[in-house]
Structures are given as structure tokens and as C-alpha cells.
Image (cartoon, rainbow, N blue to C red):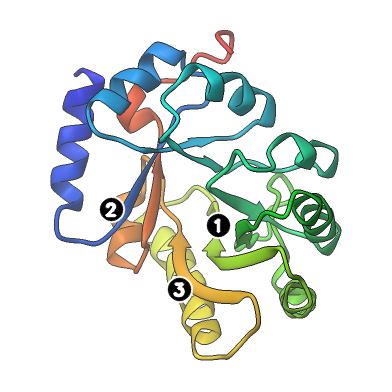
């Protein structure tokens, strides 16, 4: 199926569900991103800062770019003013770096806190026991705003996926009931190509789909 056909199928599934679709274009060429754009997509996700900054000048300027991969502190300066939403805020040190660079430019960094919901050593994200400390630090910022939560769950069967998604949704709902400075729970970013349908049933407001739109990734073609 073509990129447009894949998008049509997914968008039909998302119809009336009030869920944002982010097309994950990592490792994909400019032409593929343009094809998805021409089919109506405006939200695109990239994992690596360099790939993101290489693509931005060569594509339409109304694209909303999402940085969904781990953000190293020494790369923050390259994304200021270029990214619509950062999905991977996972430490106070990264928060301080974002605050510093965005304050210098008098801009706002919109972020999601990434939770390592499966406590996997191979994945980045904040351990749950550090969440309160990060929330407290966010309240003292002026140029970083938290808009919700994100997670990449461990691979598993449908029941396992449901359990992780429900756990994240419970955390999201609990935070939503509290009053914070600079923090709101509007976006729950969970679910990818192989589990997004389960994620939507469990309350996702944003799904990140790559292979389901663009096909298998070619990591030699970055």
C-alpha cells in the first residue's frame, strides 16, 4: 500500500476519536515526508535532533515537528524555536537546560514528561519515583510548560499492553486532578504502529505511527 493509502486507513480508524496522529518519519527520506504532507498530515515525529534539523529547511514550514526520541542536553540549543512539542522530558537536568536556552530566546518549550513505565534499562524515561521531584522543578520554570505524559511501553501481548497503558492513564488522571504552575495534563502520548488501537481504547490522546504509514525503516538510509 502507498503512504496515502496507509494514512487513509489509519485516519478512518481514528475518525471521531479525538486522537492526534503523529507520523514518525525517522530514517525516511524527504520525499516520503512530503507525500504524507500532501495527503494531509501536519504532525511529524523524529527521534534524532540532527535528522530533524536536516529535514526542517527542506519541507513546508507549517509542519508541526515532534521530538519523540531521547534529547541530550548538549543538543537542546539546536531545537529552540523549531519543535512544536518535545515528548521526552525525563530529568531535572534536561529541564534546566531547556529552561535556560528557551529563556535566552524568549520562547516557550512545550513538553511531555516521558515515564519509563516498564522500568526497562534499555529505555530512557523518568522512573516513577522521580516524578514528584520533576513536577516540583517544572513549577518553578517560566519558559518550559508540561502538557502531559508520554511512554514507550515494553513489547508484549495485548493484556500486557493494556496493563501498561492503564497504569500510565491512571497516573495521567491523577495528575489532572491536581493544580500546578506550568503543568497541565492535556496530552497522553502512547501507542505506536503495533499497539495504537489498544492505546486508544485505554485513553491515548496522541499516537505515534511510523512503519504503519511509511513501511519498514531503512537504518542505512539516514
Q: Is residue 215 among what the camera can see?
A: no
User: For this rendering, which residue is in front, 190 or 88?
Assistant: 88
In this image, 133 relative to 124: left or right?
Answer: right
Mark positioned earlier in the residue sequence (3 or 1): 1
Give x and y (percent) for residue 168: 51, 70
Height in image: 110 above or below 10?
A: below
Kindly identify which residue carries mark 1: 151
Residue 35 position by quadrant: top left
Q: CA distance from mark 3 to mark 1?
A: 10 Å
- Above or below, 51 against 7 in this view is above
Q: Which residue is mark 2?
A: 197
Is the C terminus in the top left, top right, bottom left or bottom right quadrant? top right
Q: Which secondary structure lies at badge 3?
A: helix
Q: Earlier in the sequence, mark 2 or mark 3?
A: 3
| Residue for badge 3 | 169
User: In this rendering, is residue 191 above or below 37?
Assistant: below
Q: Nearer the viewer, residue 140 or 120?
A: 140
- Compared across the picture, whether 36 is left or right of 192 comes to left
Q: Give the structural element (helix, strand or loop) at label 2.
A: helix
At mark 1, the secondary structure is loop
Q: Which residue in the rendered view is the most extreme toward the top?
A: 220
Amino acid at each position: 500500500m502507498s503512504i496515502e493509502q496507509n494514512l487513509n486507513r489509519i485516519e478512518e480508524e481514528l475518525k471521531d476519536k479525538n486522537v492526534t496522529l503523529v507520523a514518525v518519519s525517522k530514517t525516511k527520506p524527504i520525499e516520503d515526508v512530503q507525500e504524507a504532507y500532501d495527503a494531509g498530515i501536519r504532525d511529524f515525529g523524529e527521534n534524532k535532533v540532527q535528522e530533524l534539523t536536516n529535514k526542517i529547511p527542506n519541507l513546508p514550514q507549517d509542519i508541526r515537528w515532534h521530538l519523540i526520541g531521547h534529547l541530550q542536553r548538549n543538543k537542546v540549543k539546536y531545537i529552540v524555536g523549531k519543535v512544536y512539542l518535545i515528548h521526552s522530558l525525563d530529568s531535572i537536568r534536561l529541564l534546566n537546560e531547556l529552561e535556560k536556552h528557551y529563556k535566552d530566546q524568549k520562547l516557550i518549550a512545550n513538553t511531555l514528561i516521558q515515564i519509563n513505565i516498564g522500568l526497562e534499562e534499555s529505555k530512557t524515561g523518568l522512573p516513577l519515583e522521580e516524578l514528584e521531584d520533576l513536577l516540583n522543578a517544572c513549577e518553578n520554570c517560566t519558559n518550559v510548560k508540561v502538557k502531559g505524559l508520554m511512554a514507550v511501553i515494553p513489547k508484549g501481548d495485548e493484556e500486557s499492553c493494556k496493563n501498561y497503558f492503564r497504569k500510565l492513564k491512571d497516573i495521567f488522571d491523577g495528575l489532572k486532578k491536581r493544580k500546578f504552575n506550568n503543568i497541565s495534563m492535556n496530552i497522553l502520548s502512547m501507542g505506536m504502529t503495533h499497539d495504537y488501537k489498544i492505546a486508544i481504547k485505554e485513553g491515548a490522546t496522541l499516537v505515534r505511527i511510523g512503519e504503519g504509514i511509511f513501511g519498514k525503516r531503512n537504518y542505512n538510509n539516514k
